Image (spheres, rainbow, N blue to C red):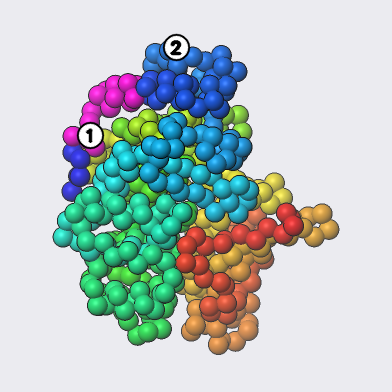
Amino acid sequence: MIFNIDFETLPREALAAIQLKRLKATLEKVYATVPFYKNKFDEAGFSPSGLKTLADLERVPFTTKQDLRDNYPYGMFAVPMANVVRIHASSGTTGSPTVVGYTARDIETWAELMARALSAGGAGRRDIIHNAYGYGLFTGGLGVHYGAEKLGASVIPVSGGNTKRQIVIMKDFGPTILTATPSYTLHLAEVAKEMGVSFKDLSFKFGIFGAEPWSENMRGELEEALNIKAVDIYGLSEVMGPGVAIECYEAQNGLHIFEDHFIPEIIDPVTGKALPYGETGELVFTSITKEAFPVIRYRTRDITSLSTEPCICGRTHVRMKRVSGRSDDMLIIRGVNVFPSQIESVLMKTEEVEPHYQLVVDRVDNLDTLTVKVEVSESLFSDEIKILQGLEAKLSHDIKEYLGVSAKVKLVEPKSIARSEGKAVRVIDNRKI
């Protein structure tokens, strides 16, 4: 089902006209109300009145996460605080948190877009949504919550944690849609198995998973473990929160970006040059309907590509490929670019290991080393050491063949890698310590 058929199926020409009108209004607003943008535009010799076409957006300077941190906490807000009804923020684990604000209309817009997203992901008014995204400063939980209510579905605001209790709720309440991070979902499946509960006996039809990169092979693991269809959702707090883009359940082939609210671009992450549709690079967003916290050409650091090919679902908005990783999470091992999701793709092809892994990077004698810790299955763990050594050698060979980088694979016992109630910690880079 398409929640807002008028906007989600607009012809590309009509969509471009709406984007241009909203973009002009947004640029004029931030120039008048946000000193950071006024200074940035003036330094670049750009005037909002000079914007004539969407292509002129390339003349506008980028915004980075560091810019948001430098203006902490409210320096990027475009409305008085009296008009801000909600504040969210990142964890700030690598610096000052990024703080974002919402007006009442922003919240309405967010709820509408999340309703669109949930609908594209298979949810409807008669569904019960088990929302295991975290509530609080993280945007995931409340974003899904408001969208579910806008859709008219029933929502269970269970949040993260209390995993055994969640399994009981799944049995008793009969939810049909699961929303969570993919890594926490795997933990849910693991705990359910320990409790003697099979997801095949539960009522779930679809799972809508996001907040961290995950591979196509991980989709297979999730669909098999939970007996559902797994759909990828994308968002980030700086742009809005979850609901910026989502796969449709019909195709499961690229995430539809709601272009009547966001203008996406792909750039070369090194040169900043705009790239055409189909080429892979860094995703950049400009929000064109946000009131409290609009962002202009915000560099997400997420690596993907865009396509305008028609989709079988009927939506006309551009689709982004599944995020393969983040440019700031990319590891460079002896000159080779490596994303955790690429390692994951290799590991998930091997039945004898579990979908729980961690990458440990070190520097020995001035040379970078990569160790891949991955949990072995319960059935294999008790086997002879020679069998385990053979599997380690095979996985090391497969990683070398696929990525062109040497890695030592270390099989570890089941449940020895720490589980997360939110985003999984996939990389430990000791070179930075």
Amino acid identity at mark 2? Gly
The residue drawn where x is 46% and y is 21% is 32
Measure how far apart labels 1 and 2 are at the Cα level: 27 Å
Q: Which residue is mark 1?
A: 7
Q: Is residue 188 left or right of residue 365?
A: left
Q: Is residue 16 magenta?
A: yes
* In front of the other: 118 or 70: 70
Secondary element type, mark 1: helix
Secondary element type, mark 2: helix
* In front of the other: 364 or 83: 83
Disc 1 + disc 2, Cβ < 8 Å = no
Q: Is residue 308 magenta?
A: no
Image coordinates of residue 70 in percent, x first then y, are 61, 37
Q: Main secondary structure of the magenta part?
A: helix
Image coordinates of residue 287 in percent, x first then y, are 40, 33
Image coordinates of residue 222 in percent, x first then y, are 38, 66
Q: Which residue is mark 2?
A: 50
* In front of the other: 233 or 313: 233
Q: Is residue 280 left or right of residue 85?
A: right
Image coordinates of residue 369 in percent, x first then y, are 72, 59
Region rendered in magenta: 6-22
